[in-house]
Amino acid sequence: MRSAKARVLAGREGLRTVDANVLLSVIQAYIDVLRDQEILSVRRSDLATLDRQMAESTAKFDLG
């Protein structure tokens, strides 16, 4: 009887550990998505700036 109770308790602790690891993985994935969205936003802004600079350079070159 004691052995069975010990196994049940060990199983519960194992389940708590798995739950905590899953929660940590979900949180990490969410933070990674937020980070990557911000990186994408910065890179799009950089691209827009480079496009504008190229258009200005092309216009200056065309004028001679």
Image: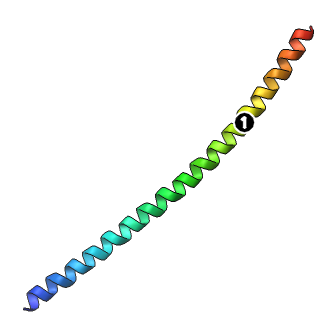
Q: Residue at x 37, y 65 (%)?
A: 22
Q: Which residue is mark 1?
A: 46
Quarter of the N terminus within the rendering: bottom left
Q: Tell me residue 7's x, y (percent).
A: 14, 82
Q: Residue at x 37, y 71 (%)?
A: 20
Question: Residue 51 lies in what quarter of the image?
Answer: top right
Question: Residue 14 lies in what quarter of the image?
Answer: bottom left
Q: Dot 1: few (<14), some (14–19), or many (≥20) neighbours within 10 Å?
A: few
In the image, is 11 to the left or to the right of 31?
A: left
**Secondary element at image label 1:** helix
Q: Tell me residue 48's x, y (percent).
A: 75, 33
Name which residue type carries label 1: Asp
Q: Residue at x 31, y 76 (%)?
A: 16
Q: Tell me residue 13's x, y (percent).
A: 27, 79
Quarter of the C terminus within the rendering: top right
Question: Residue 2 lies in what quarter of the image?
Answer: bottom left
Residue ranking furthest to the left? 1
- Give above or below for 39 relative to 48: below
The figure's colour scheme reads: rainbow
In the image, is 33 to the left or to the right of 22?
A: right
Q: Tell me residue 63's x, y (percent).
A: 92, 10
- Give above or below for 64 relative to 32: above
Q: Residue at x 9, y 87 (%)?
A: 3
Residue ranking furthest to the top? 64
- Give above or below for 63 relative to 4: above
Marker count (numbered): 1
In the image, is 36 to the left or to the right of 44?
A: left
Residue ranking furthest to the bottom? 1
- Give above or below for 36 relative to 21: above
Instruction: Please state which of residues 3 and 63 is positioned toward the viewer in this rendering.
Output: 63
